Image (cartoon, grey):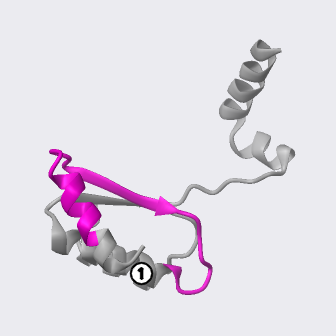
Amino acid sequence: MTIEEVELAAKLIESTGTKRVEIGGGTLLEGGGEKVIEAVKAIKKASSMDVWVNVGPCLNSNDLVKLKELGVIEVCSSLETINPEVFKEVKPLYFTHLVMSILKIY
């Protein structure tokens, strides 16, 4: 999306009465933090919505400081793995729920 499209989207979303928006997605390991910061600036310019950021590991400590200065209320990074043993170890409850759900299907 272009910055103009982000601004337009923020205006349209806010017009529905929405008070908070999440931006997130995949990760660019190089330059991803700056793209997130630019998107947040566009949202803040076009609306008064709170912003929550959920991106992969593209943010460094300087990016986090900038996001805080822009008024971002929360930043998280949902890290996943396709290795079933690692997944089971780091997300045991979710793994159990996933297995039980699959077993119910079959």
| Residue 67, position as x, y percentages in the image | 33, 74
| Residue 80, position as x, y percentages in the image | 68, 53
Which one is in front, 95 or 49?
A: 49
| Residue 103 occupies quadrant | top right
Is 70 left, or right, of 86 in this rendering?
left
Query: Which image quarter holds the N terminus?
Result: bottom left
Query: Which image quarter holds the C terminus?
Result: top right
The relative height of residue 95 versus residue 63 in the rendered view (above or below) is: above
| Residue 61, position as x, y percentages in the image | 45, 80
- Residue pictured at 75% horizontal, 54% vertical: 81
Is 42 left, or right, of 28 in this rendering?
left
Q: Which amino acid does label 1 sit on?
A: Asp
Which one is in front, 51 or 47?
A: 47
The relative height of residue 58 versus residue 106 in the rendered view (above or below) is: below
The answer, for residue 48, to whether it is visible in the render is yes
Is 11 left, or right, of 94 in this rendering?
left
- Residue pictured at 80% horizontal, 51% vertical: 82
Which one is in front, 24 or 73?
A: 24
First to last magenta residue range? 7-32
Which residue bears the numbered disc 1?
A: 63
- Residue pictured at 24% horizontal, 67% vertical: 8
| Residue 10 occupies quadrant | bottom left
The answer, for residue 54, to whether it is visible in the render is no
Is 58 left, or right, of 41 in this rendering?
right
The relative height of residue 25 versus residue 42 in the rendered view (above or below) is: above
- Residue pictured at 55% horizontal, 75% vertical: 58
Which one is in front, 53 or 65?
A: 53
